[in-house]
């Protein structure tokens, strides 16, 4: 058996540098090397690997494990569900020969036939098998890909509204075409949701060929599109988008000021969704709600001051931290020092509040690290998605955290923001009547999917057996030892020629390992959030399976792009075309930042193109030169790449003879596009042959080797990294290496001292790993505890959002009714609100059980006159309390009443504004509603009370109509102003409600886990009624402010704040909302600027806002 010196040692690998502090030892093989290698590596004999079993015992154990798995599979519910799906597969296969005989036109005409059959009464289930057979044949003709039987099962799982768990490389993208096509036949729209813009565009172009061939329209939603473009794409039969664009479009539609701004399919924007990487969207992103923010008060100057104060405070003395939930709490010493530095007597002083700024500054100092949570680019702090490693330029942290980070870095501080709309992904996707998803790792979260979405997870069997080897986890005492061992394993695999994918958890770690490999001159590629790497994400990941390829990537980067052993021939062919044509198409300098990428390319085998391809490439370069210089055309680098991409796409949609004919027809006009397409097709054949041969060699060497450099907070994320190896029956192996100094163990305060003591008793070498089952199982149990913690966070968020979910539905339904309803409906809302205010005045001052002489008529008259203001005619303003009482007494003694022209005896009549059948009908309906509601208590004077409600309501509404009529403005103009006022008012109160609910959500006290859920449930169940009774709803919350003062009540308008005698505060600096009582929201009339409206709209706003407050929730 060969030893390391005799192993493959390529001539291009330079000699190693001399030993340094960071290079502790020479190359050491991985722990699974043959025993005869130990003479080359004496220290290998000291590896603390527990191997007491003989080879025979190991073989027996493996066989028993296989047998046990088969028995478990046979007895599982999933086994029988999949078996039942095979009946559908048999039906589809039986139709295949019949469908194959159809011409292209006949196959496309099947869509029209299916839709006709649906209109005639057949169900989607009736045509499912035939529709799947049609899609299979269309994919075979347009993509050269035929659905396997297991992919038919996956499509059926999606159609049934379940989650299909399919291993990496099993063709989930192709599977989605089955369910998308079948459900799009109803004409109600299908959304295929991916995790980023690149995948949405790729799938829309790639899989869209199948749908377009079958006569369906395909839309694509991308960042930067206009409202018109979005509206057009949402109207398509199938729309590809990413999860964030979908959510923000929904929120923006519910902030629209007119119907022209709506982009989705209202009134039913949701029908059926297929969510790719559903676990990433609904689980990983589930902790971060989607927010649309508006600019709030400007306190930018406070953030740099607070950042300086945070530098003075010492952790453990002035404040304590809780890593797992990113919270800080000031000690008494810290409060005193902060107040002294800020020259304030109370950090929580309402007139000079500093607590929130200091808390955020401390959070920015402790929890938000550069190159881990964010990077600084062009003077801005840009968030790095912790799951994907990608930069999210449009995203900002809320609650002042982003401003605190900007202050810490010395950047320009942007204005504070306030939430104007929000929704979680859980609530967003619950809006779909039918929801499905696909991923490679969902079974571990099946209970969560069932509980939150009532969506089961079905494991779809692989097309070929999985032969990947998952090697035991290795634990190290120190991070330094772990990274050294990772470097050694990478080097050993590189010398063998096996491709390696190293998964890291942050930009910081990926660049640390990259520097380590550079020091040992090991060529590699890096893929993280840095712009110079992120722009080539798909290309780097696609070639990570080539021989000698070493790729360092954040754990989730490149997800959605398969790693094909030997390389991806399509991307290689496109890269060759770009290298030849781009220098002639654009004068911009190519990206030269990837210094080590040039070196890494030297170790990859050169792709030899044939003579035909070489001639076509030369022709392409010559054509690009003439087009670029001869015609004086100049493109940017991105525009030039786009030209090549369009040409490559053309080669997929047209046959070679059609392209040749097109090139001949345009021969006098420099046919650059067809020439590039023909060159691509020829080079593609050469690349396919090269990749096949190289892939065979890589398989012989053992396939892709994946190294995980730390355990994630979820086993599912680790399984996703493992799934990059061993796709479609390929060989491969995985290995996870963790150190007891990893962030996860520190973050959750896990006790790892026992493991450190165990290692120190055995060895003092920090680079020696432990693979003992007991140690590894204990570490995995810590990982499970972390999963439970984050599940608790998601569960709490969902429970809290369930309160908002009901409210949001009612508010948005009302908003869409106002926005899309006719002009008359807006007036009806205004009149209902006016009547609601009158009712409230009457109920507060009149008792149906008592005679009117016992009513508080003076206060009733005063409040009504205040509400009516200048709208009321002079005679009514002069009505006295005595005259009012005398009129009510006469009314009670009356034997009959004419309700059509009703008014109180001896009191001024309402203006004659109820002219015409429509308004008289509305007045009568309002009276019937008053009589039939249960707002008025039963009593001797119930009828008198109801008649008083009608009289005052008629008087207020008629006065309003009379004034608008005298204004001289057209009826349509008046009603449009009413619509605008209603929408703005509704948005204002909803925004205020979100702010207070978010404060309640983010408040933290010692008993938070016990108290907060009950508060939320009380909030939603008992007090937050959204039935919009009488179109008048109220806000319900109370702020329990905790401060130094003795217990006392401070009246703030109509809101009461209770002070509690202690200095404990919410950890985010906000008051903790503890109890739930009704709070009257002040009128908004004084808050609006009058300069934006002329006199008549001002009058309307005065009536609708000041006199008719819309109390929300």
Image (cartoon, rainbow, N blue to C red):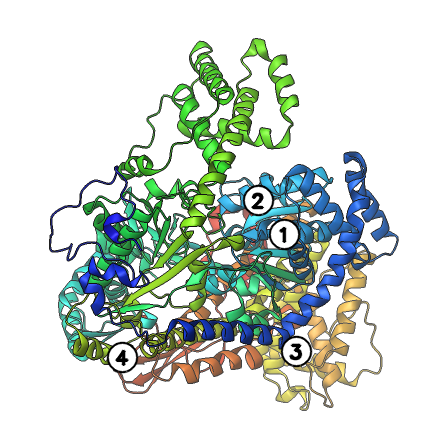
Position of 94 with respect to 604 (left or right) is right
Q: Residues within 10 Å of mark 4 (few under 14, many from 20)?
A: few
The disc at residue 176 is 1
Judging by the rendered image, the residue that carries numbered circle 3 is 884
Q: Secondary structure at mark 4?
A: loop
Position of 193 with respect to 3 (left or right) is right
Closer to the N terminus: mark 1 or mark 4? Answer: 1
Q: CB of mark 4 within 8 Å of CB of mark 2?
A: no
> Is the C terminus in the top left, top right, bottom left or bottom right quadrant?
bottom right
Position of 249 with respect to 388 (left or right) is right
Judging by the rendered image, the residue that carries numbered circle 2 is 203
Q: Secondary structure at mark 1?
A: helix
Closer to the N terminus: mark 3 or mark 4? Answer: 4
Who's the residue at 64% across and 28% down the image? 654
Q: Can residue 243 be seen by looking at this rendering? A: no
Q: CB of mark 1 within 8 Å of CB of mark 4?
A: no
- State the CA–CA distance, disc 2 to disc 3: 73 Å
Which corner quadrant of the image does residue 793 belong to? bottom left
- State the CA–CA distance, disc 4 to disc 2: 46 Å
Does 184 sit above or below residue 1049?
Answer: above
- State the CA–CA distance, disc 1 to disc 3: 72 Å
Judging by the rendered image, the residue that carries numbered circle 4 is 751
């Amino acid at each position: 058996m060969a030893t390391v010196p005799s192993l493959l040692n390529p001539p291009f690998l330079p000699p190693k540098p001399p030993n340094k502090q960071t290079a502790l030892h020479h190359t050491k093989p991985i722990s699974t090397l043959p025993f005869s290698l130990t003479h080359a590596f004496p220290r290998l004999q000291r590896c603390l690997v527990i191997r007491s079993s003989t080879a025979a015992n190991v073989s027996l154990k493996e066989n028993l494990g296989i047998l046990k798995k088969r028995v478990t599979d046979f007895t599982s519910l999933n086994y029988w569900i999949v078996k039942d799906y095979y009946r559908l597969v048999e039906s589809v296969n039986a139709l295949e020969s019949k469908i194959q005989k159809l011409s292209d036109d006949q196959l496309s005409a099947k869509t029209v036939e299916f839709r006709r059959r649906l209109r005639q009464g057949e169900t989607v289930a009736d045509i499912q098998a035939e529709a799947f057979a049609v899609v299979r044949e269309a994919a075979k003709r347009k993509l050269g890909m035929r659905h396997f039987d297991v992919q038919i099962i996956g499509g059926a799982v999606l159609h049934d509204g379940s989650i299909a768990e399919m291993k990496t490389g099993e063709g989930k993208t192709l599977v989605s075409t089955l369910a998308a096509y079948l459900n799009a036949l109803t004409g109600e729209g299908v959304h295929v949701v991916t995790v980023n813009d690149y995948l949405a565009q790729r799938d829309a172009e790639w899989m869209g060929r199948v749908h377009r061939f079958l006569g369906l329209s395909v839309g694509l939603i991308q960042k930067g599109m206009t409202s018109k473009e979005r509206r057009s794409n949402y109207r398509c039969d199938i729309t590809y988008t990413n999860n964030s664009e979908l959510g923000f479009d929904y929120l923006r539609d519910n902030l629209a000021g007119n119907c022209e701004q709506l982009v989705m399919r209202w009134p039913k924007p949701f029908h059926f969704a297929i969510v790719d990487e559903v676990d990433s969207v609904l689980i990983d992103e589930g902790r971060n709600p989607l927010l649309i923010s508006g600019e709030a008060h400007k306190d930018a100057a406070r953030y740099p001051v607070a950042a300086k104060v945070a530098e003075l405070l010492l952790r453990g003395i002035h404040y304590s931290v809780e890593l797992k939930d990113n919270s800080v709490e000031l000690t008494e010493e810290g409060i005193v020092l902060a107040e002294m530095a800020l020259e304030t007597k109370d950090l929580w002083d309402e007139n000079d509040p500093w607590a929130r700024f200091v808390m955020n500054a401390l959070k920015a100092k402790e929890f938000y690290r550069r190159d881990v949570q964010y990077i600084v680019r062009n003077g801005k702090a840009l968030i790095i998605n912790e799951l994907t490693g990608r930069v999210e330029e449009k995203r900002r942290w809320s609650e002042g955290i982003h401003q605190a980070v900007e202050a810490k870095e010395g950047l320009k501080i942007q204005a504070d923001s306030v939430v104007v709309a929000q929704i979680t992904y859980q609530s967003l996707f619950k809006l779909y009547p039918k929801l499905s998803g696909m991923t490679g790792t969902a079974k571990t979260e099946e209970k969560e999917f069932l509980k939150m979405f009532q969506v089961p997870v079905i494991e779809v069997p692989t097309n070929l057996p999985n032969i990947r080897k998952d090697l035991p986890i290795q634990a190290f005492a120190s991070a330094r030892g772990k990274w050294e061992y990772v470097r050694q394993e990478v080097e050993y695999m590189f010398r063998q020629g096996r491709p390696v994918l190293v998964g890291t958890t942050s930009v910081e770690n990926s660049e640390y390992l990259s520097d380590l490999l550079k020091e040992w001159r090991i060529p590699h590629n890096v893929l993280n959030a840095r712009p110079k790497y992120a722009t080539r994400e798909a290309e780097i990941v696609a070639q990570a399976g080539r021989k000698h390829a070493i790729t360092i990537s954040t754990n989730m980067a490149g997800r959605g792009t398969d790693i094909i052993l030997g390389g991806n021939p399509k991307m290689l062919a496109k890269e060759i075309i770009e290298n030849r044509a781009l220098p002639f198409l654009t004068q911009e300098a190519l990206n030269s930042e990837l210094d080590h990428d040039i070196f890494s390319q030297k170790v990859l085998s050169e792709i030899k193109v044939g003579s035909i391809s070489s001639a076509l490439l030369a022709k392409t370069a010559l054509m690009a030169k003439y087009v670029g210089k001869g015609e004086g055309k100049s493109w940017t680098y991105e525009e030039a790449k786009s030209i090549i991409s369009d040409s490559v796409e053309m080669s997929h949609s047209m046959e070679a003879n059609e392209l040749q004919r097109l090139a001949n027809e345009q021969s006098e006009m420099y046919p650059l596009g067809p020439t590039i397409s023909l060159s691509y097709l020829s080079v593609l054949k050469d690349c396919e042959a090269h990749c096949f041969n190289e892939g065979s060699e890589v398989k012989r060497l053992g396939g892709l080797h994946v190294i995980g450099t730390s355990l994630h907070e979820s086993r599912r994320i680790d399984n996703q990294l493992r799934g990059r190896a061993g796709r479609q029956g390929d060989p491969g192996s995985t290995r996870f290496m963790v150190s007891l100094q990893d962030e996860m163990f520190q973050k959750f305060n896990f006790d790892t001292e026992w493991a450190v003591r165990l290692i120190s008793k055995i060895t003092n070498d920090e680079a020696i790993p432990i693979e003992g089952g007991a140690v590894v199982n204990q570490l995995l149990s810590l990982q499970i505890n972390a999963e439970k913690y984050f599940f608790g966070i998601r569960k709490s968020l969902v429970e809290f959002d369930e309160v908002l979910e009901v409210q949001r539905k009612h508010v948005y339904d009302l908003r869409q009714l106002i926005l899309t309803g006719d002009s008359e409906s807006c007036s009806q809302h205004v009149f209902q609100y006016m009547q609601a205010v009158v009712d409230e005045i009457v109920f507060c001052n009149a008792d149906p059980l008592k005679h009117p002489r016992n009513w508080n008529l003076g206060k009733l008259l005063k409040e009504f006159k205040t509400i009516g203001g200048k709208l009321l005619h002079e005679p009514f303003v002069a009505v006295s309390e005595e005259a009012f009482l005398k009129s009510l007494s006469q009314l009670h003694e009356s034997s009959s009443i004419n309700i059509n022209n009703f008014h109180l005896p001896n009191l001024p009549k309402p203006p004659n504004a109820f002219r015409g059948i429509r308004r008289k009908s509305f007045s009568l309906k309002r009276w019937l509603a008053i009589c039939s509601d249960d707002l008025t208590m039963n009593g001797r004077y119930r009828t008198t009370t109801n008649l008083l409600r009608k009289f005052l309501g008629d008087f207020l509404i008629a006065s309003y109509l009379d004034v608008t009529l005298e204004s001289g403005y057209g009826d349509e103009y008046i009603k449009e102003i009413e619509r605008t006022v209603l929408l703005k008012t509704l948005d204002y109160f909803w925004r205020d409600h979100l702010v207070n609910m978010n404060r309640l959500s983010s408040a933290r006290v010692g008993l938070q886990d016990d108290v907060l859920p009950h508060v939320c449930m009380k909030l939603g169940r008992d007090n937050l009624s959204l039935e919009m009774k009488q179109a008048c709803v109220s806000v319900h919350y109370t702020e329990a402010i905790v401060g130094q003062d003795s217990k006392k009540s401070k009246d703030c308008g109509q809101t009461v704040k209770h002070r509690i005698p202690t200095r404990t505060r919410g950890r985010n600096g906000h008051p903790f909302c503890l109890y739930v009582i009704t709070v009257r929201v002040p009128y908004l009339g004084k808050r609006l600027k009058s300069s934006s409206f002329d006199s008549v709209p001002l009058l309307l706003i005065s009536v609708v806002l000041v006199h008719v407050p819309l109390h929300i929730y």
